[in-house]
Amino acid sequence: MLFLELIAGILVVLAFIHFFWTKRQDEYKGRLILQHLHTSQDMKKTLALGLYLRFLPTGKQLENNALLLKDDITLEAFTASLLEKTRGGTAWVLADADRLGINLEHQTKEGLFLGQIVRTEHEIGFEQIALVHSNIVKKRAAGGYVVTAGIFSEDAIVYAKGLNIELIDGVGLTDLWLASLGIAEKEIQKILPQLT
């Protein structure tokens, strides 16, 4: 009798463990799907805004447009998230950009990468790259990034060559975003092959 009770107890414990393991897996899958859907919606909104701005008639006012309403996410947080998803490691935004111009740090297995995310409607010049390079040397970092949703001047592109500083413009940022979506989709396909 004791033997049967022991076996029944072990079976109950195994069923309990299996239940919680399965529940955790299902919750993870659900979170992953929700994150992917949210990212897809963000992408659609951003692309819609880009199309709107691209084909806006000359002299048209941009104020009071529903597409221009800001979300909680900042360009800095968006960039940090993309770097983590596409390049691994941990990226974090510095609360206040330090006086030396660094507002992003990205720790990877290759080392620390320092970044500056620049928001401006003008071309980014070589000065931003010089600030990042100076910080790389001071902190002995592995490299760096200068990121903008806009573009870089020719001087900036020439200056950055050989400094191990990656210049990520608006198109490069879009490429990172699409790569992160591809990674998320592959992860979902691995977990839920029956949905693909």
Image (tube, helix red, strand yellow):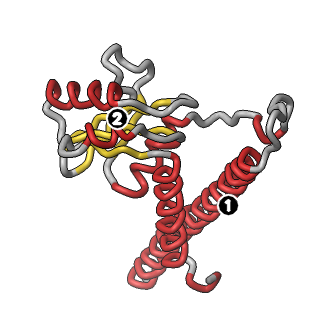
Indicate the position of residue 35 as horizontal and vertical percent values: 61, 57
Label 2 crowding class (10 Å Cα cut-off): few <14, some 14-19, many 20+?
A: many
Horizontally, is 38 left or right of 193 in the view? Answer: right
Seen from the viewer's position, the closer of residues 146 and 179 is: 146
Q: Residue at x 83, y 31 (%)?
A: 61
Residue 112: image quadrant is top left
Q: Secondary structure at mark 2?
A: strand
Seen from the viewer's position, the closer of residues 114 and 131 is: 131
Q: Residue at x 63, y 55 (%)?
A: 39
Q: Secondary structure at mark 1?
A: helix
**Which quadrant is the N terminus positioned in?**
bottom left
Horizontally, is 104 left or right of 45 in the view? Answer: left
Q: Residue at x 26, y 48 (%)?
A: 108
Horizontally, is 151 left or right of 42 in the view? Answer: left
1 or 2: tag closer to the N-terminus: 1
Residue 1 versus residue 150 in the image, above or below: below
Amino acid at dot 1: Leu
Indicate the position of residue 188 as horizontal and vertical percent values: 54, 72
Amino acid at dot 2: Gly
**Which quadrant is the C terminus positioned in?**
bottom right
Indicate the position of residue 109 as horizontal and vertical percent values: 21, 51
Residue 140: image quadrant is top left
Instruction: Report which residue position mark 1 lands on.
Output: 37
Residue 76 versus residue 161 in the image, above or below: above
Seen from the viewer's position, the closer of residues 25 and 53 is: 53
Q: Residue furthest top?
A: 99
Q: Residue at x 43, y 39 (%)?
A: 152
> Decide: marks 1, 2 in contact (CB < 8 A)?
no
- Nearer the observer, disc 1 or disc 2? 2
Indicate the position of residue 103 as horizontal and vertical percent values: 39, 27
Horizontally, is 26 left or right of 66 in the view? Answer: left
Instruction: Report which residue position mark 2 lands on.
Output: 115
